[in-house]
Image: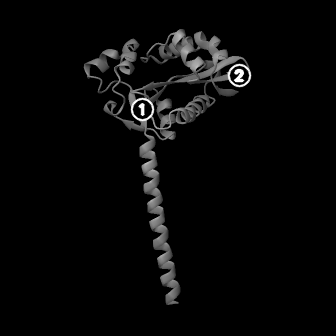
Amino acid sequence: MRIVTTNSSHSKYADAICKTIEDSAKDRGTGIAKRSPEYIVSKIESGNAVIALEGDKFAGFCYIETWSNKTYVVHSGLIVHPDFRKLGLAKKIKKKIFEHSKVKFPNAKIFGITTGLAVMKINADLGYKPVTFSELTDDDAFWNGCKACRNYDILERNDRKMCLCTGMLHDPKAVSEENIFNKKVLTRLKKIKQALFLKKKNNQ
């Protein structure tokens, strides 16, 4: 199994990707924004996607979208072909595109909205936190993409503040600040431990 960043040679899989995404939504009975093969091709050819292949057979896919002048990144269309499910492939694809996003857009906040519990768990393992929709992009183009979803009326009735999807966010700045805080705490604890050790040694 190969999981690679896409290029134009992978455009031939666009129809299969779109059909797999649509069939999955029908099977789960959940709303999902539809994607056209042309749109998927644009993501593939720009290198803003990753694809999993077993030989020449399509196994899984996910792509990157940027919003609010590239200050926000979202991973969309995460899908695994039925023949390759329950093998942990979705997590591997998500990790690959997460790492790819951090290289291409190192300062961007990475977020997603989903109804899938499996995706929520994968996001949580990567460091995403559940957030309200107000912490996500306010780019109208992003939210207009939800119009193809069967649950769009719920989002609209709630002024885009909530829907059946859960919002999750990875903020690199917050992670960096948390790491600095944790490092300071560990340094302080180390100094206290050293002081206690020296005090004990001097009293012997």
Q: CA distance from mark 1 to mark 2?
A: 34 Å
Q: Residue at x 57, y 32 (%)?
A: 100
Q: Which residue is mark 1?
A: 71
- Give residue 69's quadrant in the image: top left
| Quadrant containing the N terminus in the rendered view | top right
Q: Quadrant of residue 61?
A: top right
Select label 1 or label 2 by which is in front. 1
22 or 51, which lies in front? 51
* Image-based side of 46 in relation to 167, left or right: right
In the picture, measured across the screen, residue 175 lies left or right of residue 50, that is left
Looking at marks 1 and 2 on the same chain, the residue that comes earlier in the sequence is marked by 2
Disc 1 is placed on an element classified as loop
Q: Position of residue 103 (x, y in %)?
A: 56, 35
The three-letter code of the residue at mark 2 reads Glu
SS of the residue under disc 2: strand
Q: Amino acid type of disc 1?
A: Thr
